[in-house]
Amino acid sequence: MTDERIERGFRQHPDFEQTGENEFETTAKPFENVVFVTDGESGDGDESTHEYRVVVRTPMLDAVVAGEEVAEVVESGWFETLERRLEDAHTVAQSDANPPSIEREGSGGETESRDEEVVVTVEFESADPEQAVEDALAVAEYVEGTWVQGIIPGYDYREPAASLRERAMQNYDEGEAGAGRPDDSSAGGRGPGSR
């Protein structure tokens, strides 16, 4: 049975819903992000440590490309790059987390790669349920952001990649607009032609 403090921590967080006993999910995210909680070792005093396992499932590249198949060599290279970029996913947690397990799962094969997905698992222990919830969300968002950064230009994408890519471009454009370009009046009154 899950500690009531843990259930309350996930229940009160706007990004999580309880989907089973000891199981919580970020249902509003584009990828399946599930947190499994188990009893850990007893800590000091009344607090006990619990183990948290964050499992994030993302599609392989071919699963989100529209209108054509991605060559296996491209798909494999894309996965290897994603795998390297996710090696430090555990470092976003404030808890002492283990390095992630990163697997390519599914039917596979050259003609069935659309059924494949990337499964990233990060495990950590925590005696602080509120911090554990934040750590779990940080891992899920890190995986999502890293996946989006790995989208290869030149393909047409279907969901969820299309909307994630659009949102990333909007965020970039908004950041650029507020950065104060040299020809911008916010740059100390110096515009083009000023000396």
Image (cartoon, rainbow, N blue to C red):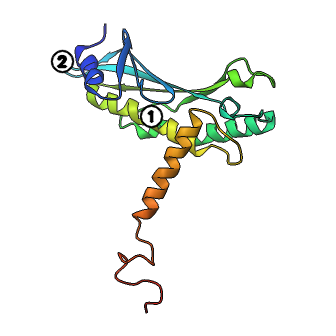
Q: Which dot, 2 or 1, sits closer to the camera?
A: 1
Q: Quadrant of the C terminus?
A: bottom left
- Would you say the residues marked 2 and 1 are in contact, meaning their CB atoms lie under 8 Å apart? no
Could you tell me the amino acid type at mark 2? Asp
Q: Position of residue 78 (x, y in %)?
A: 69, 39
| Picture mark count | 2
Q: Which residue is mark 2?
A: 46
Q: Would you call the spot at circle 1 few (<14 residues within 10 Å), some (14-19), or many (20 or more)?
A: many
- Picture quadrant of residue 159: top right
Residue 85 seen from this side: yes
Q: Of helix, strand and loop, which one carries label 1? A: helix
Q: Position of residue 137 (x, y in %)?
A: 39, 32
The residue located at (47%, 35%) in the rendering is 90
Q: Earlier in the sequence, mark 2 or mark 1?
A: 2
Q: Of helix, strand and loop, which one carries label 2? A: loop
The residue located at (65%, 38%) in the rendering is 157
Could you tell me the amino acid type at mark 1? Val
The residue located at (22%, 20%) in the rendering is 47
Report whether 100 appears left or right of 70.
Answer: left
Front residue of 14/184: it is 184
How far is disc 2 from disc 1 in space, using C-alphas? 28 Å
Residue 48 seen from this side: no
Q: Which residue is mark 1?
A: 139
